[in-house]
């Protein structure tokens, strides 16, 4: 009896459902376009490779700590290398400052520094030179001696020439063939020349691992290890004042 | 089909509702229902039509708004793209300047290192020259001393010769002592000369 009447109602229900359902799919009005969409992130920086090691004059710390030492003897002249360990102290070899009438120290940029005193170690080929003027930069001495295969960088003035940085690896240790040092010394394949004596040998972190003091006949370099250097520096009695010739 | 069972009785098969006798008492009710149904349907359809129109209107506005929205975003995007291009060009320029500055810095540091080396070499040469001059001065002084000693030796020998020519006028012992002194003086002068010659020969 009621079937005809239900038809429009059903149709209406279906349509209403469709309308309601489609209302859910009706897109909202767009939001306003923001005035500024630039994210507030830090500005990108240009790559600054190695800039942390650079000084304002463009030289890195490795170069700035190296000094050239001129040994003016009573009848001789020789040159060697050295490096700063604090603002007024530099390390070199005993044989670099031996038989000197005066010592003349110059920096990487050619400045001359006045020397106030010098002393040498008896049990190692090491010497300490004090300067009146402040040294430009000084590295940290490493806590441990290097292992075989570790990288090593030598910075100095080979043959009394221009400041040079050379690289190599630690080959091992040996007894000092020159009998200048107590204990074992380091052997590296970093190239050195006469005049490189007293150069600092640095690890990858720029810390001192040794002091160049000799070259072998097969072209290898010999270093006084940092442990010996520390030992000598910790014992002030191990150094005696250098007497001019 | 039998027509005798009654005028409005249904036959065995259902018949369409439209097939009805003109004098059916239920006809007005059905007509009313049909009319009501039609009205309801019309009303529903009208409501739906209105709803559809509203929906269309809304969608029209929404579409227009989204078109405007998209257009403004596109405009913004173009603006930012131009800004990005400008900044990129600026960055390229700055990067090129940086590379150039680094090259200049490398050149400058290398030059400073060279100049420091030249200064050190000149200092070495200066010290070596000074040492050579000192050596020359010492040699000259030594040569002067040797020349003086040899001169004194020669003078003493001449004096000794004069004494010997008039030997009787002098005490032989004094002559002997003087001759010994002259010999010692000349020996010292000769030693000094020999030492100087050896020094010069080195």
Image: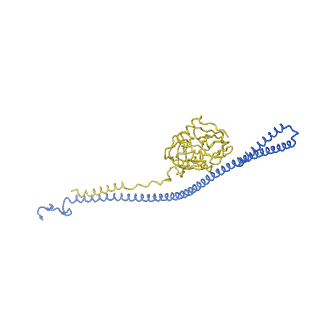
Chain colours: A yellow, B blue
Q: What is the x, y in percent for residue A146? A: 50, 43
- The structure residue drawn at horizontal position 51% and vertical position 48%, both measured from the top left corner, is A169
Q: Is residue B120 left or right of residue A35?
A: right
**Quadrant of the rendering where the N terminus of chain B is positioned:** bottom left
Residue at the location (24% across, 60% down)? B31
The answer to which of A179 and A186 lies nearer the viewer is A179
* Left or right: A112, with A214 as reference point: right
Question: Which of these two is toward me, A203 or A149?
Answer: A149
Which residue, as the protein is rendered here, is positioned at the far right?
Answer: B169
Residue A168 makes an appearance in the image: yes
Is the residue A43 above or below the residue A143 in the image?
below
Seen from the viewer's position, the closer of residues A88 and A177 is: A177
The answer to whether residue A55 shows anywhere in this view is no
> What is the quadrant of residue B56 in the picture?
bottom left
In the rendered structure, the answer to whether residue B33 lies left or right of residue A21 reads left
Residue furthest top in the image = A237
Name, please, the residue furthest toward the bottom: B1
How many labels sit on residues? 0
Left or right of B81, for residue A71? right
Q: Is residue A196 above or below residue B72?
A: above
Q: Position of residue A228 (x, y in %)?
A: 55, 39
| Residue A114 in which image quadrant | top right
Relative to A230, say whether B114 is above or below.
Answer: below
The image shows residue B72 at horizontal and vertical percentages of 48, 58
Q: Position of residue B57 (x, y in %)?
A: 40, 59
């Amino acid at each position: 009896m009621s079937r005809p009447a239900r038809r429009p109602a059903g149709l209406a229900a279906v349509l209403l459902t469709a309308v309601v359902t489609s209302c859910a799919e009706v897109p909202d009005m767009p939001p306003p376009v923001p005035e500024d969409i630039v994210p507030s992130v830090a500005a990108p920086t240009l790559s600054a490779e190695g800039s942390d090691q650079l000084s304002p004059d463009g030289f890195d710390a490795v170069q700035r700590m190296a000094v050239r030492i001129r040994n003016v003897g009573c009848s001789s002249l020789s040159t060697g290398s050295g490096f700063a360990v604090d603002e007024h102290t530099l390390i070199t070899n005993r044989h670099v400052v031996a038989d000197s009438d005066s010592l003349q120290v110059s920096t990487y940029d050619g400045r001359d520094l006045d020397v106030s005193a010098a002393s040498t170690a008896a049990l190692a080929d090491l010497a300490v030179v004090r300067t009146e003027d402040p040294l430009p930069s000084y590295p940290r001495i490493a806590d441990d001696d290097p292992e075989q295969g570790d990288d090593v960088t030598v910075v100095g003035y080979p043959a009394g020439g221009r400041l040079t940085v050379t690289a190599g690896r630690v080959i091992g240790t040996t007894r000092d063939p020159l009998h200048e040092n107590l204990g074992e010394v380091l052997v590296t394949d970093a190239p050195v020349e006469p005049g490189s004596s007293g150069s600092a040998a640095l690890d990858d972190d720029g810390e001192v691992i040794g002091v160049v003091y000799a070259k072998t006949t097969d072209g290898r370099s010999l270093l006084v290890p940092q442990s010996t250097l520390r030992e000598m520096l910790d014992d002030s009695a191990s150094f005696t004042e250098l007497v001019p010739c | 089909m039998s027509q005798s069972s009654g005028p409005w009785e249904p036959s065995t098969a259902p018949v369409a509702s439209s097939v009805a006798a003109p004098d059916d008492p239920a006809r007005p009710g059905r007509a009313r229902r049909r009319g009501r149904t039609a009205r309801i349907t019309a009303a529903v359809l009208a409501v739906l039509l209105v709803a559809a129109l509203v929906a269309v209107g809304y969608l029209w506005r929404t579409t227009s708004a989204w078109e405007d929205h998209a257009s403004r975003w596109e405009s913004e995007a173009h603006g930012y793209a131009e800004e990005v291009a400008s900044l990129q060009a600026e960055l390229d320029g700055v990067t090129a300047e940086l590379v150039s500055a680094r090259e200049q810095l490398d050149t400058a540091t290398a030059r400073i290192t060279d100049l420091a080396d030249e200064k050190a070499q000149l200092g070495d040469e200066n010290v070596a020259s000074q040492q050579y001059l000192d050596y020359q001065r010492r040699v000259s002084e030594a040569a002067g001393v040797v020349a003086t000693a040899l001169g004194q030796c020669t003078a003493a020998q001449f004096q000794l010769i004069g004494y010997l020519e008039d030997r009787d006028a002098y005490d032989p012992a004094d002559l002997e002592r003087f001759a010994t002194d002259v010999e010692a003086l000349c020996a010292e002068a000769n030693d000094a000369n020999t030492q100087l010659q050896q020094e010069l020969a080195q």
